[in-house]
Amino acid sequence: MATKKAKKKAPAKAKSKSKSKPKAKSASKPKKAAAKPKAKVKRKPNAAFMKPMNISDVLSPIVGSKPLPRTEVTKRLWDYIKKNKLQDAKERRNINADDNLKKVFGGKKTVSMFEMTKLVNKHLS
């Protein structure tokens, strides 16, 4: 048998898998000035909220009988609740209804503030 000579190959250049590191930033560049805070732009209210709504006879003793926007109805309703101390002392999210509010809330004695807006909207047209 003929022996084969082992050929030595020149080692191939190994490609490094690591990427070259970015150069450090030079200190000679001027730093950017801090961005100025944007001036607050007053938002326009949504026209649907500002449209005057007719108040039902049941809700009128609380907020008045003139047509009012939904936002104003909610504001007056909270004024009434605070004036008569109808917000529950322990669970602040609940509203304890008096005689006028019971009619608005459909006979419920206690209503959460989130449910309240849904029940009040039934009395606006």
Image: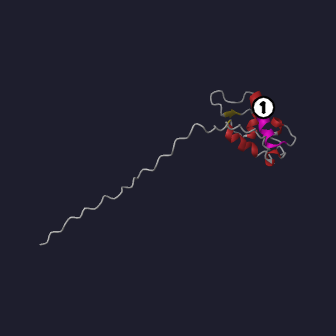
**Which residue extends farthest bottom?**
1
Looking at the rendered image, the quarter that the N terminus falls into is: bottom left
Image point (75%, 38%), residue name: 40
Residue 123: image location, x then y, percent: 78, 45
For residue 69, what is the image quadrant?
top right
Q: Which residue is under mark 1?
A: 79
Q: Amino acid at mark 1?
A: Asp
- Is residue 123 shown left or right of residue 32? right
Determine which quarter of the picture holds residue 12: bottom left
What's the magenta region? 68-77
Relative to 6, does residue 42 appear above or below in the rendering? Answer: above
Q: Nearer the viewer, residue 10 or 54?
A: 10
Q: Position of residue 70 (x, y in %)?
A: 79, 43
Q: Nearer the viewer, residue 94 or 14?
A: 14
At horizontal 65% and vertical 38% (from top left) the residue drawn is 32
Q: Return the x and y of residue 51 as percentages of the image width and height.
A: 83, 47
102 on left or right of 10 = right
Specify whether residue 106 is in view.
Answer: no
Q: Which residue is rendered at x = 65% and y = 34% of the image?
A: 93
Q: Secondary structure at mark 1?
A: helix
Neighbour tally class for label 1: few under 14, some 14-19, many 20 plus, Cα within 10 Å = some
Is residue 75 part of the magenta span, yes or no? Answer: yes
